[in-house]
Image (spheres, grey):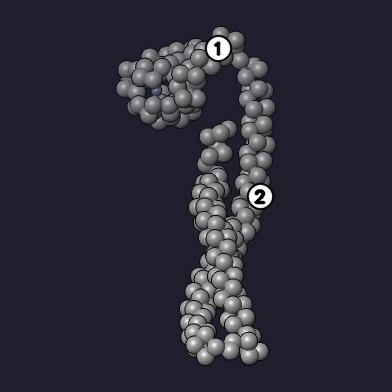
């Protein structure tokens, strides 16, 4: 039965989809880590900008309130304001760059996540077709098994035992039809003298193939 199920094309497709899902899941996991890292990085960059802005505001406030009386101190403070301004610009550039990277990573993550969902949909369809076919095969197998039981019930016990033994040894085929002088089991064409011997045997005698040892079933087309 396992062998038959493996021949259902949907089984191969299910394995293929599972392989692709694993690849996608790995990509999604890596992208999630990347997005999380970038979210943290963005928060840090934002906090850096805010910190410097607060300091600039404080300095500006002191100047505006006329709290810095000493001209030298005022000059120093204006210089510091200038450098704080440049610092804010460069920190904002960093933040912008992080935000762009985050946007790209988030878009990839959304795309891959959507692919996983689409794949799950495909897999469900294929699995349904697989279950249908596999169910049909189970039904067919049950029918064949019932037929076999009916057919075997009229057989002599020693013949059935021989058949079962051969079947186990010969890859599931214990008996073969003799058609057009050929053994259906091993495809050997019997020579005239062997055919002559077989032709003389009583019809209820068990005939075996010289080559593969299987039970040979004589038919109307055996060529005897
Ligand atoms: Zn044979």
Residues 8 and 43: in front is 43
Residues 178 and 185: in front is 185
Looking at the image, can residue 34 be seen?
Answer: yes
Residue 85 in the image: above or below residue 162: below
- How far across and how far down the image is residue 7, in percent? 52, 41
Quadrant (top left, top right, bottom left, bottom right) of the C terminus = top left
Quarter of the displayed picture in which ligand 1 can be seen: top left
Residue under the point 61% across and 15% down? 155
What whole-number distance in Å separates the C-alpha atoms at marks 2 and 1? 41 Å
- How far across and how far down the image is residue 206, in percent? 49, 13
The picture quadrant where one finds residue 106 is bottom right
Residue 191 in the image: above or below residue 138: above
Residue under the point 57% across and 66% down? 44
Residue 214 in the image: above or below residue 8: above
Q: Determine the secondary structure under disc 2.
A: helix
The residue identified by callout 1 is 161
Residue 79 in the image: above or below residue 45: below
The residue identified by callout 2 is 128
Quadrant (top left, top right, bottom left, bottom right) of the N terminus = top right
- How far across and how far down the image is residue 124, in percent? 65, 52
**Nearer the viewer's eye, disc 2 or disc 1?**
2
Relative placement, left or right, of 182 versus 98 is left
């Amino acid at each position: 039965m396992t062998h038959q199920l493996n021949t259902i094309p949907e089984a191969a497709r299910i394995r293929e989809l599972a392989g692709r899902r694993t690849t996608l899941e790995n990509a999604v996991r890596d992208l999630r880590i990347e997005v999380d890292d970038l979210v943290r990085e963005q928060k840090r960059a934002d906090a850096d900008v805010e910190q410097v802005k607060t300091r600039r505001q404080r300095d500006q406030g002191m100047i505006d309130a006329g709290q810095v009386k000493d001209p030298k101190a005022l000059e120093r403070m204006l210089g510091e304001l200038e450098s704080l301004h440049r610092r804010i610009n460069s920190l904002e550039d960093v933040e912008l760059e992080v935000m762009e990277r985050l946007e790209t990573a988030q878009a990839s993550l959304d795309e891959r996540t959507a692919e996983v969902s689409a794949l799950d949909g495909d897999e469900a369809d294929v699995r349904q077709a697989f279950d249908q076919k596999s169910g049909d095969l189970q039904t067919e197998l049950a029918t064949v098994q019932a037929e076999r039981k009916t057919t075997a019930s009229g057989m002599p016990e020693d013949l059935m035992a021989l058949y079962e033994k051969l079947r186990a040894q010969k890859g599931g085929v214990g008996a073969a039809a003799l058609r057009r002088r050929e053994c259906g089991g091993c495809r050997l064409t019997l020579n005239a003298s062997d055919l002559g011997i077989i032709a003389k045997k009583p019809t209820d005698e068990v005939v075996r193939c010289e080559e593969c040892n299987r039970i040979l079933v004589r038919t109307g087309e055996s060529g005897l």
